[in-house]
Image (cartoon, rainbow, N blue to C red):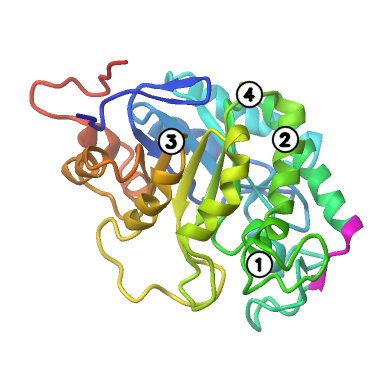
Amino acid sequence: MTTLNDSIRIGGLTLRNRLIMAPMQQYKGTPEGYATDHHVEFYSRRAKHVSLVIVESTAVSPDGRLFPNDIGIFSDAHVEPLRRITDAVHAEGTPAFIQLSHGGRKSSPEVTKRLVAPSAIAYDETYGTPEELSVADIAAIVEQYRLAAKRSVQAGFDGIEIHAAHGFLMNQFMSPLSNKRTDGYGSTPENRARLLRESLAAIRSEVGKEYPVIVRVSATDYHEGGLTPEDWARMLKPLESDLDAIDVSTGGLLPVQPADVYDAYQVPHAAAIKPHFRIPVIAVGLIRTRSLANRILEDRLADAVAIARPLIDDPDYGERMLAAAGEPVGSGHP
């Protein structure tokens, strides 16, 4: 019977338990997108008990930043500030992944000089109407992901999470609600997944086969005609041999909210995706107690759980989730 304290493998990496720190924006980057002392202290302070820290969304392009005060990895100068984070997290005996992203039509209006998307469809009036990417533009973004992967290794990260969730560029390409293209990057599920497929291949060309690469998805767009867990399973299945885990979230493509938010409300979407894959599936979304996490794992609804907000409020929250009578904190077995 699987519990939160059991170890798990993601690619070639063995995690000491199944509690992961999910990526969560800190809004503490410099105007140039550099990580700061805040990030070093924040992530290292929370790394002691979780088995993996996934650092917040990190932009692969200066025009793909989600917020004016987030962080980036779009130049070599960004490497050393990020290296300070990985060094501090590693000092706690914990691996660190980086979440690579491009905001597309949801890039920050305050710092983005050129707003782009698969199709010229606005997210809302605040962001404005984006410019439709040309095929050459798309190739340039794939190259940005390759360079970001190279810098991620230089910065000491143990793995990469591709951000294809929450309505950002990868998600925009995947969903028929935001991708109305009629070329090789649209029209069919296979074509809509092409940017992800090409970016994943570019990342693999830098990091090799054994380096963990995972993807975060929004399993539903919360709108008729949008993506479903089954759609994601069909699009990701051909990529499974190059992926090491799937991190399942929901929403963000449109300015709409789920009808009801409750404890573990996103877990059914992870559970719907899980049977299609052999690689681990990570569940997120208001999983706040050990008993709930263990039930998710025991019922095989997911292979690991990730939390963020509880750790923001309390750096030691993970210690209590892992603690149980007669079971040492952080223990695990192969």
Please tell me the numbered disc located at residue 203: 2
Question: Alpha carbon of mark 1 to alpha carbon of mark 3: how far?
Answer: 29 Å
- Residue at horizontal 26 percent and vertical 39 percent from the top: 297
Q: CA distance from mark 2 to mark 1?
A: 23 Å
Where is mark 3, residue-wise?
A: 280
Tell me the amino acid under the disc marked 3: Pro
Per the rendered image, the range of residues in magenta is 131-136
Q: Amino acid at mark 2?
A: Ile
* x 36%, y 21%: residue: 16
Report if the CB atoms under discs 3 and 4 are less than 8 Å apart. Answer: no
Where does residue 177 sit, x and y in percent of width and height?
A: 62, 74
Q: Nearer the viewer, residue 6 or 30?
A: 6
Q: Please, is residue 85 above or below residue 104 in the view?
A: above
Tell me the mark number nearer the camera, choosing from 3 and 2: 3
**Residue 156, label in figure:** 4
Sort mark 4 into few (<14), some (14-19) or many (20+) by Cα contacts within 10 Å.
Answer: many
Mark seen at residue 106: 1
Please tell me which residue lies in front, 230 or 289: 230
Q: Secondary structure at mark 2?
A: helix
Q: Do the CB atoms of the residues marked 4 and 1 lie less than 8 Å apart? A: no
Q: Earlier in the sequence, mark 1 or mark 3?
A: 1
Label located before the other in sequence (4 or 1): 1
Between circles 4 and 2, the one closer to the viewer is: 2
Q: CA distance from mark 4 to mark 1?
A: 28 Å
Q: Position of residue 45 (x, y in %)?
A: 40, 32
**x and y, in percent, of residue 216 in the image:** 53, 48
- Of badges 3 and 4, the one in the foreground is 3
